[in-house]
Image (tube, grey):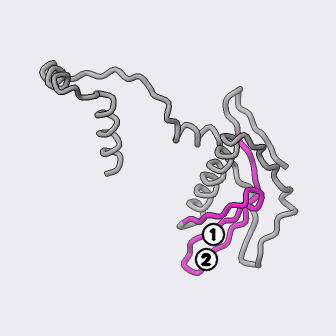
Amino acid sequence: MEQDYRKGDSTVKYVYPACFYREDDGRYSVEIPDLNLATFGDDLPDAMYMASDAAAGRLLLLLKDGETLPGASELKDILPEDETGFVSLLCVDLDAMRASHDEAPIKKTLTIPSWLNHAAERKNINFSATLKDALIEKLAR
């Protein structure tokens, strides 16, 4: 039941069935049988997001390794392990995952004071590495 939805020529999405189980603490565990994958979320929306994110990561890893992506089972063929679970379709957006983990360099133009430029050049400071490190530190806060 693997479905490849295309929007234009660039967006690729796959649909896989997943089993969701509400845990005693209110969190949800998720199993994606076709990908032999499990994850969890703090609540149902978080579990849906985490499952989609984990599935996209698995599919991209398979593609990177040159493997064929597994087909999706029919929804009717996936049954939860117990009565507390339910099955839902999961939309997996490979382009969104690629974009959030893309290491390709992007050229940016920036402006700094002349004195700072000269001082940094005298110390052989790598502007790109310094900006990258500063942005990573700022985003981690």
Q: In the rendered view, does 77 fall on the left or right side of 90?
A: right
- Classed neighbour count for the residue bearing mark 1: other residues with Cα under 10 Å, few (<14), some (14–19), many (≥20): many
Q: CA distance from mark 1 to mark 2?
A: 7 Å
Q: In the rendered view, does 80 fall on the left or right side of 60?
A: right
Vertical side of 103 occupied by 108: above or below: above
- Which corner quadrant of the image does residue 19 belong to? bottom right
Q: Which residues are magenta?
A: 13-41
Q: Position of residue 77 (x, y in %)?
A: 87, 63
Q: Residue at x 49, y 35 (%)?
A: 103
Vertical side of 135 occupied by 47: above or below: below
Q: Position of residue 60 (x, y in %)?
A: 65, 43
Mark with earlier residue (1, 2): 2
Does 21 lie within the magenta span?
A: yes
The residue under label 2 is 23
Residue in the foreground of this view, choosing between 93 and 66: 66
Vertical side of 121 occupied by 57: above or below: below
Q: Give residue 134's mark.
A: none
Q: Main secondary structure of the magenta part?
A: strand
Q: In the rendered view, does 46 fall on the left or right side of 93?
A: left
- Which corner quadrant of the image does residue 132 belong to? top left
* Disc 1 and disc 2 in contact, CB within 8 angstroms: yes
Q: Secondary structure at mark 1?
A: strand
- Check disc 1 and give the amino acid type: Ser
The residue under label 1 is 29
